[in-house]
Amino acid sequence: MFHTPIVPRARKRSRPVDAGVSRREEVKFEDVRLYLVERKMGHSRRSFLTQLARSKGFAVEDVLSNEVTHVVSEDSTASSLWNWLKECAPKNLPNMHVLDISWFTDSMREGRPVAVETRHLIQDTLPTLPEGPTPTAVATVSQYACQRRTTTENNNKIFTDAFEVLVEIYEFNEIEGPCLAFRRAASVLKSLPWAVQCLGDTHNLPCLGEHTKAIMEVRPTLFTSVFGVGPKTAEKWYRRGLRSFSEILADRSIRLNRMQQSGFQHYGDISRAVSKAEALALRNIIDEAVHAITPDAVLALTGGFRRGKEFGHDVDFIVTTTEMGKEEGLLPRIIDKLTKEGILLYCDYQASTFDISKLPSRRFEAMDHFAKCFLILRLEDSQVGGGLHIAEGDIRGWRAVRVDLVSPPMDRYAFALLGWSGSRQFERDLRRFARMERHMLLDNHALYDKTKKEFLAATTEKDIFAHLGLEYIEPWQRNA
Ligand code: DCT
Ligand code: MG
C-alpha cells in the first residue's frame, strides 16, 4: 500500500574481491550486504533464499564478516539470536541491522532493499519469555505526548486525517469517549518515524484500541466549517434540510451573527491555508503596531508556526509588555491602530477575566482568561516575501487571514506561551501527565503542586518542564 524510499547507508566502501558473492549475478545494491542466519532457517531454505536474493541483485555473504550490513534471521527468540551473534562477535555488529525475515520478503517483493523500519528490527533486549512476542522498539512509545517527539513530518497522515474527521463527528455529537480515543490514536501515529503498513505494526503501540484499529481501513471524507459556525448551529441547519452555502444565505429565516457573516464573506480566504511567509509578514505588521504603542512590548509568534509548520489555519501571537500591568489596554490600542491602517476586517475582542485568586482551575480543558482577540486581517501581496498564498488567477492582490492575539501579564508569560504553542493534543497530555503522574495542575495560567499546596513559578517553558520532571521538548517536537 505504501512506497517507502530506500534509505542509503551513509558508509560507502569498495567491494572486497573475495566476498563469497556469486559472480554469475550482477550486484545492483552496492551498499547492502546480507547475511542469512542458518539457525532455525535450515540449510536448504537458506540456500534457496540466498539464490533468490542474488538473482535480484543483492550481495549475500556466506560468512558473518564485518562487511555485512543486514543480518536476516528467522529465529524469533531475540535473546538466543543475540547471544549467538555476540558469540560470533564481528566487530561491526553494532552497525549492522539485525532484521527478521519480513524485511527480506518485503525487499524481495520490491526488488530492492526496502528502508529498515522499527517493525523489521530484532532488538537486543533483556531476555524475554521464550514464547513472548518479538520485542520491538515500538514497545517504548509513551502514552503521553509530552514524552514523545512529534515533528511536522507525519508518516501516517492517511490514518490521522481519518481519525481527525471522526473526532469532529463525535465532538459534533458530544460523545466524549470515542472522541478522546481517536484523538490519542491520531497523536500516537503522528509521532512514529515510520509509516504503519499493516495492523500488525500497531501491535505494541499505546492508545490504539480495537475500535481504532478497525477504523484504520476507513477512508476520510472532507468536513469543513465556516468561521463562527459551531457544531450546534451546523446541525440545526442540516436538520432543516439545508445542504449548501447558497441555501443558507438565501434562507430569510436565518439570521447570521457578525462572526458568521464574516465567515461566509471571507470563506474562500479563511478556509485556505496560511503560509509561513504570510505568518511572518503578519508578525512584521503587528510588531510595528505594538512598538508604535509602547517600546517595551513583547511579541511572540506561537501556535503551529512556532512548531515549524509550513501552513496553518490561522496565525497566533502572544503580545504583552515587560512591565507588569502595562499590558492592560494593549489589545484595544492595537485594534485601534489596525483599524486606522484599514486592515481590520473583523474583530472579536474579549477583555481579561483573569483573576489569580481563582486559581488553580480544575477545568483544565477550559479556555484561558487572558485578554484576547480573534481577528480577520487584510494582508497585501506586496507585504509578503514570495507573494501571497492564493489561488492561481486570483488578481485581488490581497487576502484575508485569521489572526489570534492573546495578552497575558508578564508573570504568566511562560505558561501562556507553552499553552498557546500547542499542539492541542500535546497540551492535553502535558496536563494529563501533570495531574496523573505528578499530582500537579497545569493550565495556560499557572502550575500548581497539589502535594506541596503551592504554585510553582516559571519564567521560561524550560522551567515548567523541569518542575514537571520532564525532558525539555522543543516546540518543533510538539506536533502531537
Ligand atoms: N489554544 C488555547 N486556548 C484556546 C485556543 C487555542 O490554549 N482558546 C492553544 C491550543 C493550540 C494553540 O493554542 C493554537 O491553537 P490553533 O491555532 O487552533 O492550533 P495550531 O496548532 O496553531 O494549528 P493551526 O495551524 O491549524 O492554526
Ligand atoms: Mg494556529
Image (cartoon, helix red, strand yellow):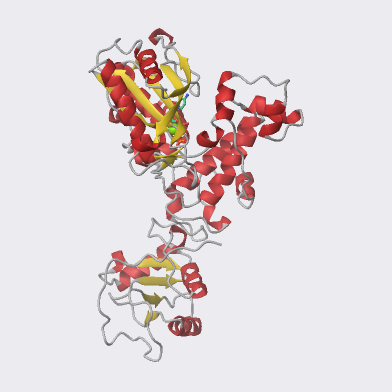
Residue at the image point whose x is 66% and y is 25% from the top: 232
Task: Please indicate whether residue 37 sits to the left or right of residue 255 in the image.
Answer: left
147 vs 465: above or below: below
Between 363 and 387, the one lying in front of the other is: 387
Residue at the image point whose x is 64% and y is 34% from the top: 170
408 vs 211: above or below: above
Res 273 seen here: yes
Q: Which quarter of the rendering shows the N terminus?
A: bottom right
87 vs 135: above or below: below
Between 398 and 124, the one lying in front of the other is: 398
Question: Residue 148's quadrant in the figure?
Answer: top left
The extreme left residue here reads 295
Between 157 and 394, the one lying in front of the other is: 394
Q: Where is residue 181? Give x, y as percent.
A: 57, 38
Between 336 and 478, the one lying in front of the other is: 336
Task: Please indicate whether residue 209 sits to the left or right of residue 292 in the image.
Answer: right
Q: Where is residue 404? Give x, y as percent.
A: 43, 25
Q: Where is residue 303? Give x, y as percent.
A: 40, 32
Q: How many marks?
A: 0
Task: Please indicate whether residue 83 sits to the left or right of residue 197 in the image.
Answer: left
Q: Where is residue 27? Give x, y as percent.
A: 37, 83
Res 464 seen here: no
Ligand 1 rendered quadrant: top left
Q: Which quarter of the rendering shows the C terminus?
A: top left
The extreme front residue here reads 395
